[in-house]
Amino acid sequence: MTSELPDTLTETARAFIAKQRGAYIDGEIVEGSGGELSTIDPSTGAVIATLRESDAAVVDRAVASAARAYAEEWRDLLPAKREALLHRLADLIEEHAHELSEYDALEGGKPIAYVEAVDLPLAVEQFRYYAGWPTKITGSVVPVSTPGAHVYTQKVPLGVVAAITPWNFPFCQAAIKLAPALAAGNTVVLKPSELTMFSSLRLAELAIEAGLPAGVVNVVVGTGATTGNELVRHPGVRKITFTGSDRTGRLLGSIAGENLIDASLELGGKNPHVIFADADIPKAAAYAATTAFFYSGQVCFSGSRILVERSALDEVVGVLEEHARALVLGAGLSTDTTMGPLSSAQHLEKVEGYLQAAAEGSGSIAFGGKRLPGAGYFLEPTALVGPADDESVVAEEIFGPVVVVQPFDTFEEAIERSNDTRFGLTAGVWTRDAGKAHRFAQSLDAGTVWVNTYADYNAAAPFGGMKDSGNGRDCGPEGLEKYLDTRTIWMSID
Ligand code: ADP
């Protein structure tokens, strides 16, 4: 059932949304008898469509379909054939890039021009990069000290993978999980966030169109507490791959532990973006501004804590403000928009809660801080200068267009304060001194450190977190390895 859809939505997207009922299993739309699940346009608060949540029976059907497709179709498919199918899927994503972008712009409030320019190419790159792997997955011959033995290993898939994705990069995250999981020979049940479902449902349909056997990619829809919970606890699931909050990550890690399966968890970050006074300050400040407010700061690797050597503080804050004032706030589907709304009313309240707490603290608002009037969930891009390290606005991941800017005085202080966080996803450092840059980068407890740049991402470069930012890595060979098991074969050659 569809409700109010913006005029700017194409007929193709409108028709796709109108035909959705719930899950997509074995190449078919499956409604089931779960409760109603509405998705909301965050720029207006209006209902986009109402589907049926996938209940336990639907989740069971999805896992059974994936298990059958694994055993009968996908696991033993010739590597070159799997490669060709993943490339074909990448082709179809490219062909439908605008339509796919529309879903994330509508449900997620993401500026469509950015989704099309950033998210879609990243997703295509995932399928193309991992399409190259099936023909290169090898075991090894093991030189055991046992007479008359020939021992070798095989790298084998795990089976059915439960992929749980968040609302901030719906399509991109689905690709980041599916491409390596499928390349390794697994089949997937994907549960997108209940806020952003359509691009994942369309991806599953495109997988069928590309020629992947029915059941290799299934999508269930629903909230985390209901559908997500049923999926991750299902005994047929052999691996959980998750991107989202550290709170949910902890829970899924413990469920995986009970079931003796592995969970790869890409969680949040409170990422230090450090600017030394000897850096190219205008360039560093421009990067800091862009990456703090990109997608309204709802990005796990957002450079949301900017540490600036004291003499450069005012210049950096000035550039941030200039950038923030130039942002055009609006609906994701509007091509003029450069910053969209927050994802939900509840999330906006949470972000405002951090600002209220900060009002009692030692920082001051340099600009922004107010929510826009109207029904959409818009908050002005905001900078807080000088809050103390132990304030929640500095210590916690806000996941909104709120950046904190803090001065520092020495190299050692910058390292110590950058590491004084429970998170460890990413960090950035700007300096013209190469030795200083290396020393700094190597001292950081972060999965990725960017030097004189920020937020670069490529399917070939491992990405993931240390400390409370999670475990495992997406992208690169590491991103494939986590979807593989090892079988050791001993053979007597006496
Ligand atoms: P956020 O706070 O960013 O929404 P969450 O970690 O709550 O992050 O959500 C990320 C994804 O995890 C979403 O798809 C959500 O539905 C799912 N999720 C949340 N709780 C659970 C759960 N208990 N079991 C399985 N999935 C969950």
Image (cartoon, grey):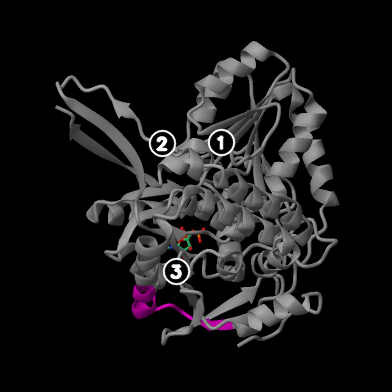
Asked if one can make out residue 108 in the rendered structure from this viewpoint, the answer is: yes
Question: What residue did someone put label 3 on?
Answer: 215
- Mark 1 is surrounded, within 10 Å at the Cα level, by few (under 14), some (14 to 19) or many (20 or more) other residues, namely many
Relative to 264, does residue 335 appear above or below in the rendering? below
| Bounds of the magenta segment | 50-61
Residue 331 place in picture, x, y as percent: 76, 67
Q: CA distance from mark 2 to mark 1?
A: 31 Å
- Mark 2 is surrounded, within 10 Å at the Cα level, by few (under 14), some (14 to 19) or many (20 or more) other residues, namely few
- Name the front one of labels 1 and 3: 3
Q: For ligand 1, give the image quadrant.
A: bottom left
Question: What residue did someone put label 1 on?
Answer: 426
Mark 2 or mark 1, which has the lower sequence index?
2
Residue 276 place in picture, x, y as percent: 69, 22
Residue plotted at (83% across, 50% down): 325
Quadrant (top left, top right, bottom left, bottom right) of the C terminus:
top left
Q: CA distance from mark 2 to mark 3?
A: 26 Å
Q: The disc labelled 2 sits on which kind of residue?
A: Thr
Q: Secondary structure at mark 3?
A: loop
Label 1 CB-ligand 1 distance < 8 A: no
In the rendering, which numbered label is found on residue 138? 2
